[in-house]
Amino acid sequence: MSRYALLISPSSNRVYADASVALTRAELAVFDRAVLGGRLTDIAETVFGGARYVTFTADGLTDRDLGYLANLSSIYVLFEVTGDLLRPVELHPLDRFDDDLLTIPKYPGKTNEQFTKLLLNVTLLASDFATEMLERRFRVLDPLCGRGTTLNQALMYGYDAAGVDHDRADFEAYATYIQTWCKRKRIKHRAESGPVRRNRQVVARRLQLELAPDKESYRAGRTQRLDVVQVDTLRSAEFFRPASQDLLVADAPYGVQHGSRSAGRGLARSPLALLAEAVPVWAGLLRPGGALGIAWNTNVARREEAAGILADAGLAVLADGPYLDFAHRVDQAIVRDVLVARRP
C-alpha cells in the first residue's frame, strides 16, 4: 500500500478555502466509489510543514486512476509519501484551454470556480457514464447558466456545453466575453448570435459557437459546441431535444442577492417553486443514465423538500455516503449543499 498527500489549490475565497479540505475529502470519496473501485482508504486531513493536505492510501494506482484524480476540483499537487519525504506525482488533467477562461470573469454573485468544477464532477460521477470521464465528449446543460461559469468548465474538459438563462444582461455579457476571449487567445472558432423568431416574433436570443483548442483539431472536425439561449428555463425543451443531454448542472438561486422566479409567483426567496416547475422539464432533457446536480442554499429550502421534487420527476436521488457531505457555509446567510440524482 502506498500513501499519498494531496495539496489543495489556494482559493481566492477565504470562506471556501476554509471548507476546501472537507469538500475535497467528500469529492475524493465520490471518485473512489464511482471510478476507483473503492480502493482508497484512510482519507483524512494531515498537516505537513504547516500546510493542510488530504491524505489517503491506495494499492497500485494506475495511470488511468491518476488521470481521474488529476481532475479533482481542488487538486494542486499530488505527492507520494515516502518516509519523511513527499515525491511529486505527475498529473495530466483534461484541461484543453488556459485557466483564464474561468478566472477572468469577475462579477457580483459569481460562483467559485473550484466549487463549479466540484459540482460538475460529482454530477458526472453519479451518471452511468462515469468511467468514460476521460474520453467521452459529454453534453452538459446548465439550465440556470448566468454568465457561464459551468459552461466554461465544461469547455475546459473538452465537452459540449449548453446553457439557458432568462436574464438578457447576463446573456449579452457572456456572449461578448466568450467571443472576445476566443479572439484574444487566437482560438479557432465560428460563432452565430442573434434573435430567434417564430411567427414573426422574437421569442429568444441565441449564441451558437463551434471551437477547437488548435487549428489542426478544427480542420479535422474535432470541435466542441457551445449553445446558449436567453429564455425562461421552463421553455428549455423548445430549444433542446428530449434525452439529448448527458449532464444537467445548476446553481439554484440562493434567495439572498438573487431570488427565484416561477410562473405566476414572481420573485421568491425559496428555489422550491422554481424547481417544482423546472425539474420535470429538465429531467426530460436528460438521456437515460444521465445525471442532474443542483447546488442550493439550505437556509431557504430543506434538503428533503428539494430531493422530493427530484424524485417526483422520476429521478433517483443519491442520498448516502459522501453525497451527504458537501454542505458548507458560503456567508452568514448561505449554507450551500449539493443534491445529485440520476435518470434511470
Image: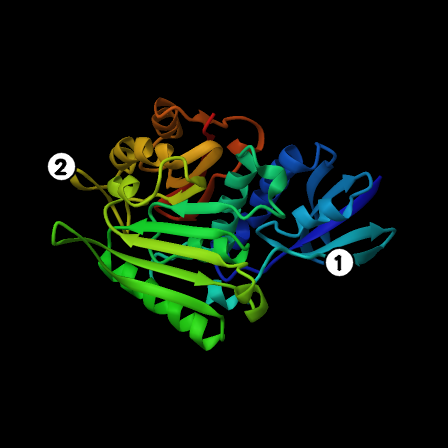
Colour setting: rainbow
Q: Mark 2 or mark 1, which has the lower sequence index?
A: 1
- The residue tagged with tag 2: helix, strand or loop? loop
| Amino acid type shown at disc 1 | Glu
Report the label total: 2
In the image: residue 40, left or right of residue 336: right
In the image: residue 111, left or right of residue 216: left
The structure residue drawn at horizontal position 75% and vertical position 58%, both measured from the top left corner, is 90
The structure residue drawn at horizontal position 39% and vertical position 27%, both measured from the top left corner, is 307
In the image: residue 324, left or right of residue 244: right
Give the x, y percent position of residue 196.
22, 55
- State the residue in front, 59 or 14: 59
- State the residue in front, 129 or 38: 129
Give the x, y percent position of residue 26.
59, 39
In the image, residue 339 above or below residue 113: above
Quadrant of res 176 = bottom left
Give the x, y percent position of residue 146.
33, 54
- State the residue in front, 299 or 173: 173
Give the x, y percent position of residue 82.
86, 51
- The residue tagged with tag 1: helix, strand or loop? loop
Disc number placed over residue 156 in the picture, else none = none
Which image quarter holds the N terminus? top right
Disc number placed over residue 264 in the picture, else none = 2
Disc 2 from disc 1: Cα separation: 54 Å
In the image: residue 257, left or right of residue 218: left
In the image, residue 80 above or below residue 300: below
Residue that badge 1 annotates: 90
Instruction: Spot the residue most to the right.
Output: 83
Q: Are marks 2 and 1 in contact (CB under 8 Å)?
A: no
| Amino acid type shown at disc 2 | Gly
